[in-house]
Image (tube, rainbow, N blue to C red):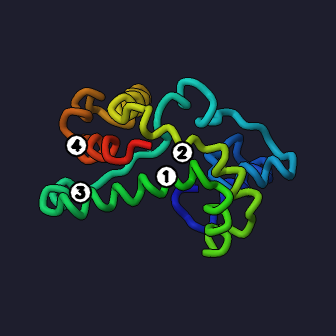
């Protein structure tokens, strides 16, 4: 399978050639509508996954150091877009369809309503990095300890400043 763009994991699953795949909207909605397969883990609701961020923003440390204003502006825009997804999912779903990012408004709206966009102020990103680093270390994907990864590869200054600035 690898990274061949012609290989579609969803189709391999439908054909019974793989037992499972990692699906992102609109794939789960499509399979649900076709009554195909079962959800094994839904990271939005199943513990322990639901207690952590599903996504984090990464950046080049040299760029962030040289361009802190631009870095903070980019992160602010991402967080404001996240807030918009939480507060007005129907508007965002319409924009996704009108922009050609997805053909189905109903699937886009369902995904926007299911993903916990409103929790970015509550979750601890350091705990998230530690959690996923531990999982990756347990299966042998990485050698570094979670503590080392957090200490050497994270900087929460911009996020902490924006949490205060964007209080809602």
Identity of the residue furthest to the front in this view: 168
Q: Please tell me whether residue 58 is drawn above or below residue 135 in the rendered image.
A: below
Tell me where residue 27 appears, x and y as whole percent: 70, 54
Circle nearer the viewer, 2 or 3? 2
- Give the CA separation, mark 2 to mark 3: 24 Å
**Upstream in the sequence, badge 1 or badge 2?**
1
Q: Tag 4's secondary structure? A: helix
Contact check, label 3 and label 1, Cβ < 8 Å: no
- Give the CA separation, mark 4 to mark 1: 19 Å
**Upstream in the sequence, badge 4 or badge 1?**
1
Which quarter shows the C terminus? top left
Tell me where residue 81 appears, x and y as whole percent: 48, 57
Tell me where residue 102 appears, x and y as whole percent: 67, 67
Residue that badge 3 annotates: 60
Circle nearer the viewer, 3 or 4? 4
Which quarter shows the N terminus? bottom right
Residue that badge 2 annotates: 117
Q: Residue at x 25, y 47 (%)?
A: 158
Crowd tier of the residue under label 4, counting other residues whose Cα lies within 10 Å: few below 14, some 14–19, many 20 or above: few
Q: Tag 1's secondary structure? A: helix
**Upstream in the sequence, badge 3 or badge 1?**
3
Count the numbered circles shown. Answer: 4
Q: Nearer the viewer, residue 40 or 74?
A: 74
Tag shown at residue 157:
4
Residue that badge 1 annotates: 82
Q: Is residue 140 visible?
A: no
Residue 93 occupies quadrant: bottom right
**Upstream in the sequence, badge 2 or badge 4?**
2
């Amino acid at each position: 399978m690898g990274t061949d763009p012609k290989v579609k994991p969803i189709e391999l699953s439908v054909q019974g050639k793989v037992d499972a795949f990692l699906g992102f909207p609109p794939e789960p909605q499509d399979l649900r509508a076709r009554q195909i397969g079962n959800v094994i883990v839904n990271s939005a609701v199943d513990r322990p996954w639901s207690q952590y961020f599903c996504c984090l923003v990464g950046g080049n440390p040299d760029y962030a150091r040289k361009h802190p204003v631009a870095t903070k502006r980019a992160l602010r825009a991402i967080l404001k877009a996240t807030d918009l997804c939480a507060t007005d999912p129907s508007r965002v779903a319409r924009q996704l369809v009108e922009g050609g990012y997805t053909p189905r408004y109903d699937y886009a709206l369902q995904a926007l309503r299911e993903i916990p966009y409103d929790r970015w102020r509550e979750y601890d990103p350091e705990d998230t990095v530690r959690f996923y680093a531990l999982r990756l270390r347990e299966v042998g994907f990485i050698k570094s300890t979670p503590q080392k990864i957090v200490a050497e590869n994270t900087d929460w200054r911009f996020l902490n400043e924006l949490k205060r600035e964007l209080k809602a």
